[in-house]
Image (spheres, helix red, strand yellow):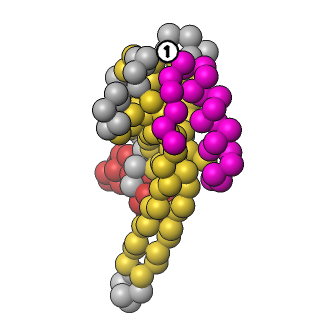
Amino acid sequence: MIKRNKLDKTFGPIGKSAGIVLFVSGLIMTYSSLVGLILVLPGALIGFSSTMTFVDFDKKRVKFSNNIFGIIPIGKWMTIQSDMKIGIKKSNNAWRGYSKSNRTVDITDIDYRLILYDSNDKEIMPIQKSKTLDSAKLNLDKISKELGISVIE
């Protein structure tokens, strides 16, 4: 069984909004001229690209993927070894955008991520994102048992 875990938008929430505006504007413009296609492609790239993790519990492997245009996954599978570990890490992402009138828009995103570590306790990749610490702990226990790896406290 393969589980898909969505992580983040590649260009953040402000890039997502700007990309969707470009995409829709390009679609509207293509009805009158083909110049609108110049806006459609970058708008789709910026607005819909995201990151995701695939966890294959049957074959014990994981894949970190960048989804170009939101549909084309790019990444490679990594086999889980018995000396790998999994742990929880708090993530504080802050996104800042500027308007023409020099006003700033700050968006903060605080969540908890399950991180895969190698045998030397070096971070390899995020596995899953949770909003609360309690749900992250529940997911940590479940995933560590299913993959057969130990937990970092």
Residue name at image x 68 percent, y 38 percent: 138
Q: Position of residue 114 (x, y in %)?
A: 51, 40
Residue name at image x 34 percent, y 50 percent: 42
Say if 48 sits above or below 18 in the image: above
Residue name at image x 51 percent, y 27 percent: 150
Give whichever of 114, 62 is nearer the camera. 114
Residue placed under numbered mark 1 in the picture: 60
Q: Position of residue 135 (x, y in %)?
A: 68, 45
Residue 68 visible within the image? yes
Q: Quadrant of residue 94?
A: bottom left
* View extreme (bottom): residue: 101
Residue name at image x 68 percent, y 48 percent: 134
Amino acid type of disc 1? Answer: Lys
Q: Is residue 64 left or right of residue 107?
A: left
Q: Position of residue 124 (x, y in %)?
A: 35, 35
Magenta region: which residues? 131-153
